[in-house]
Image (spheres, grey):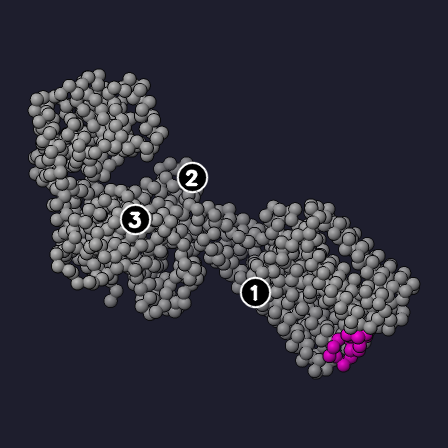
Amino acid sequence: MAGIGFRLTKLMQKRTFAGGLQAYGYAALIGSGPWVLSMVTLALLGLVLAKAGEARELDLFFVTVTHICAFSLVVTGPLQLLLSRYAADCVYAKQPEKVFPSLLGGLTVVFATTGLIGFTFFTGFVPAPPAFQLAAAGVLMVISAIWIGAVYVTAVRNYNAVLRCFAIGYGVSFGAAWLLSGWAGLAGTMIGFLIGQFVLLLAIVRVIYAEFGAAAVPSFAFLGYFKRHRALAGCGLVYNFGIWIDKPLHWWLSPHSYQVSGALYSSPLYDQAVFLSFLSVAPGMAVFLLTLETTFAGRYTEFFRLVVEKGTLREILRTKAEMVDAIRDGLSQLVKFQGTVTLALVIGAERLLRSLGLGAVQTLVFQVTLVGVFLLVLFLALLTVLFYLDRLRAALACCGAFATVNLVVTLAGLMMDERWYGLGFTAAAAAATVLAGGYVNHAMRRLEYETFTSQPVYP
Amino acid sequence: MTARPVENTADVCLVLEGTYPYVQGGVSSWVHQIVTELPEVTFALFFLGSTPEQTVKKRYTPPPNVISLTEVFLFERLPPDELVPGPVPGPARARFYAALREFYIAPDGADRMSAFWGAIDALEAIERAGSRLTFGNLMRDEEAWGLLTEACERFAPDESFIDFFWAVRFVHLPIWTALRARPRLPPARLYHSVSTGYAGLLGAIAARRQRVPYLITEHGIYTKERIAEISQATWIYDPPSRYFDVGEGMGAFKQLWINLFMFLGEVSYAGAQRIVSLFEGNTYLQIEFGAEARRLEVIPNGIDPSKFDAACAQRRTRLAGGLGAEIVVGFIGRVVPIKDVKTLIRAARTIVAREPRAVFHIIGPTEEDPDYFEECRQMVTLMGLEQKVLFLGPQNVREILSGLDVCLLTSISEGLPLIILEAFAAGVPCVATDVGACRELIFGRTAEDKAIGRAGLLTKICSPLDTADAVLRVVSSAENLLTMGQAGRTRAERHYRQTEIMGKYRRFYTDHSWSALPAPSAQTSAP
């Protein structure tokens, strides 16, 4: 009899929710964790070493490390996010043995590129003793490698071991820098710092090996992700660019900056205040991490579990409402907590900075950027939600707005006067927060629509 | 015949789903007969297949009066541009989705049929305006999503949503592929679909748009066959029953597919001015599936009795001298479970016990279901009937018929079996199960037909005793065999003559006065 046999069986059985359950949890934190760390380090180094003596000499060390931090974060930004995605995919696909080789592959790539750049830059554009130049190039390589390692560290469950790594690493850095500075001056400081950072890197790699231990052969399979996940790579680059761009602009264009050595400039008026205000980020990040981990991530997982495991429409929509509540609660807690900290610091700014030996202009910059940091934490929270929801284009747009506003307003501020300093960063954080809020709102409103309708008809 | 002017409007567009000229079978040979025996009628063929891979080569070569062949594959991948939403202006899109909503979520008692045509009209209005609505629109438009979730809330609030989602998508995929093929329907003066289903849908749409008659011929009952197929299907998610409700029937997702085919049947039936079935039993099913009684007509399959004249005469001569040393009971057909050969073998034992002259010839291919054939053979051996039940394989039916005393059919299910007509033409009485058209064939359909007399006997299905009894009664005397055989021959000559049947279709095709019945779809067509 006329009629057509069903051919849908195959179609039905192959359906998947590709990418629906990828672990994005730490993506934004990975983007933020390293710079928090670097800011803290720089601020501490600045404070401790500045009191230790010969300011001029130490300036070169301090400024060099600042440049290294800034440059290494921007350059490794894309790779950090891609490797985190790659590692998450490996774990999701139940192939944890692929994780460690990808770390080794990532380190190889980073060593090769930053080694070449560092050697060229420091020997060619920074007049200093050759030992200092070489050690500085080494620090660039090792710090870049540490950022890559930090990606994997977030997945290590032995949290004490991780903390021990950083304690030992920074302990050795300080100690060796201190000791060797007496023996070989500035070059000795840099070499000592290099040794400490190298110890930190080794410790990190060892901890990661203990977690994912497998074949110790580098693998470069992750390089394919550059093509497949352009928006993600773009986020890593643009976000880090946006976070840093106001500083070099001040180094190069501010009337208060000066040439430290060759291509290296410094603008202490701006740098110290900004680095200090970044220290205020810690409490907000902690609160945010907590709410994200406890409520939002749980609801997120439940939402996709219901989608895949035959939940009814009503159950799915209810869970989505709970996700929205979790975001709202998390943000409101963040505002209360970080807001209190920020407010307290803004009020006490004058006293605090005077006790650290900083002046009135710096106090103003500190106050302005404190507000910026408060907004930045909100932005990061929203960015993380966007990563969770796989809205990478939206995330990229937010990062792009962040970088652009920072660049433009900072430039404009430099053409005006000191009262404008820091406004670029704060305005950028404000713009990015508003934009990301809009995107999160939109994405949540259309969550179930997007989750289903974006499924391809044919597998 | 004079050369006919070349023109592209065919007299008849045959809409064929999964048959001629690519698939072999009863329906296909019927279609081939029609196009071959009506050379003065021009045909355009519109073939609906599954996928191109399954439709590699033609099984039939259509004659020259077939002026075109269009192929559409319902389960072929949609092209990439069909998967992205087309730029449809907001108001036009809103009208389309409003009509669609009325169709799916119409309040009880609302006219779904006119809502359906409203949606088709909205779709065609979009196309006339130079735009195009794609499957991508149905996937991505927020109106479509709203409709989907509303339908879920309304009809399947407690079902797995992901299964609902995929079921809805997959139900619409072949429908959409069929609807996309609308512009490719060849122009014709009449549309004739040889089933309902997707073919019926397209036939109804084409005829409505061009305001020409639409005719359906159903060999089997499409809707019933699809329902049987779906209830057996394992690829549709059937939620575990929560309350052991045995009577509840099928799960929501199977019901979704069934609703689709039921609706396709209704659209086809409502659009056709005449609905033909092969025998009366099927007209009741058609009514059950939504066909209006006044549009129905029975036109059976036909045969050319003159081809069997020799066989008929030979047999008569043989029986004139009374029953022979052997009484040959013939089974002609494939040895497969649906023909229930095992019941025949069981009946054979009883028959042989009471009539030792009886032998059984099983004629037909045995390789389709080798396991079943093997079981039948073992049964024959176990019963010690090796000398009585013979598997002869495929034979020339016309030659072998003259040697048969009675033809036996034990099928569980049948349509209108051609073999009964062939046996009648050769003057061989038939004993057959009471399925399909067998009753009308053996006892007659109309009063005048019944008056011709019985051409054999009917039996219950799966009943060896009943079968044995009937066979014994038919072969009780040579006289009986001749009388019943003559009744069959007369019936075939009067009511199943191939030329008569072709004549009916010729009249359908050339004189459209039968279509004067106003079709409901024509009344609701857009201004």
Circle 2 residue: B241
Sequence-wise, the earlier of marks 3 and 2 is 3
In depth, the one of B333 and B85 nearer the eye is B333
Q: CA distance from mark 3 to mark 2?
A: 45 Å
Q: Please name the residue shown 69% across and 59% down the image.
A: A109
Q: Which residue is mark 1?
A: A394
> Is A75 situated left or right of B46 in this image?
right
**Tag in front: 2 or 1:** 1
Structural crowding at the residue carrying mark 1, measured as other residues with C-alpha within 10 Å and reported as few (<14), some (14–19) or many (≥20):
many
Circle 3: residue type: Lys
Q: Amino acid at mark 2?
A: Ser
| Chain on which label 2 sits | B
Q: Which residue is mark 3?
A: B58
Disc 1 sits on a residue from what chain?
Answer: A
Residue ID at (50%, 50%)? A16
Depth-wise, is mark 3 or mark 2 nearer the camera? 3
Task: Check disc 1 and give the amino acid type.
Answer: Ala
Q: Nearer the viewer, residue B78 or B298?
A: B78
